[in-house]
Image (spheres, rainbow, N blue to C red):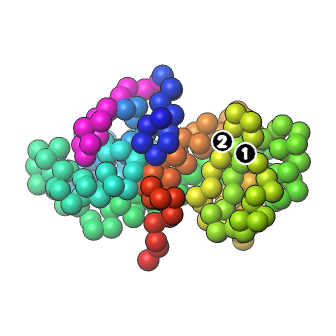
Amino acid sequence: MGRGGAPKDRGDGPDRKCIATGEVQPKYGLVRFVVGPDSEVVPDILGKLPGRGMYVSADRTSLEKAVSKGLFSRSAKQPVKVAETLVDEVETQLARRVVDLISLQRKAGRAVAGFEKVKNWLQMEEAEVLIQAVDGSGRGKSKLSTPHYGSYIGWLTADELGLAFGRQTVIHGALASGGLTQRVVEEAQRLKGVRVKEDGRGHPKG
């Protein structure tokens, strides 16, 4: 397992070194940054922005170290500007990315929301991933179990899941296999590393 709980067994894509830890790992377990035209460090969540990439492990401790220790300037070999809110911006963009991917799976018929629909998918072994809102009732969430050999995502809020499923709020969701489901799991692991502390509690908002 890599940092943030991301599996290390995916073979595609080259490895990159984290500028904060020195650890070499697959790119999907890291966050890419580039230096923008105004010399400000910009997160590149999709990995498509032009410029030389700088990589940091997708966990809050590493990101905060990169910011506080001036590691972006060292890596870029030039003075760069780093916003105080950079780590929070990474979290926001990663959450938006996960929400967008779940929404695409929903539109493709590979995602459902609501306790009864999720329960039915689990019973029929249609579900590959169980998703539950971090701020949902613990008692209610305990009535559903992660699919055998499947994955669990439990660090999105009910509001974020609501956006993904086109509702006001959602507590329970599930994804079928195929399509973008593996990508959802990988991006959710990156989000978990940035959002969830080692003691299991989320990073306080505001």
Query: Can residue 191 be seen at all in this image of the molecule?
Result: no
Q: Is residue 49 left or right of residue 139?
A: left
Whether residue 147 is situated above or below residue 98 in the rendered picture: above
Tell me which corner region of the image, top left, top right, bottom left or bottom right, holds residue 16: top left
Which SS does the magenta portion mostly show? loop
Q: Residue at x 40, y 31 (%)?
A: 26
Q: Is residue 82 above or below residue 145?
A: below
Q: Which residue is mark 2?
A: 151
Q: Residues within 10 Å of mark 1 (few under 14, many from 20)?
A: some
Residue type at mark 1 is Thr
Q: Are marks 2 and 1 in contact (CB under 8 Å)?
A: yes
Q: Is residue 113 magenta?
A: no
In the shown orientation, is residue 23 left or right of residue 183? Answer: left
Residue 11: percent from the left, percent from the top? 48, 22
Name which residue lies at 39% across and 64% down: 88
Q: Is residue 144 left or right of residue 206?
A: right
Magenta residues, start to end: 12-24
> From the image, which quarter does the C terminus lie in?
bottom left
Instruction: Tell which residue pokes out farthest to the top in this image.
Output: 11
Neighbor class of circle 2 (other Cα within 10 Å; few <14, some 14-19, many 20+) is some
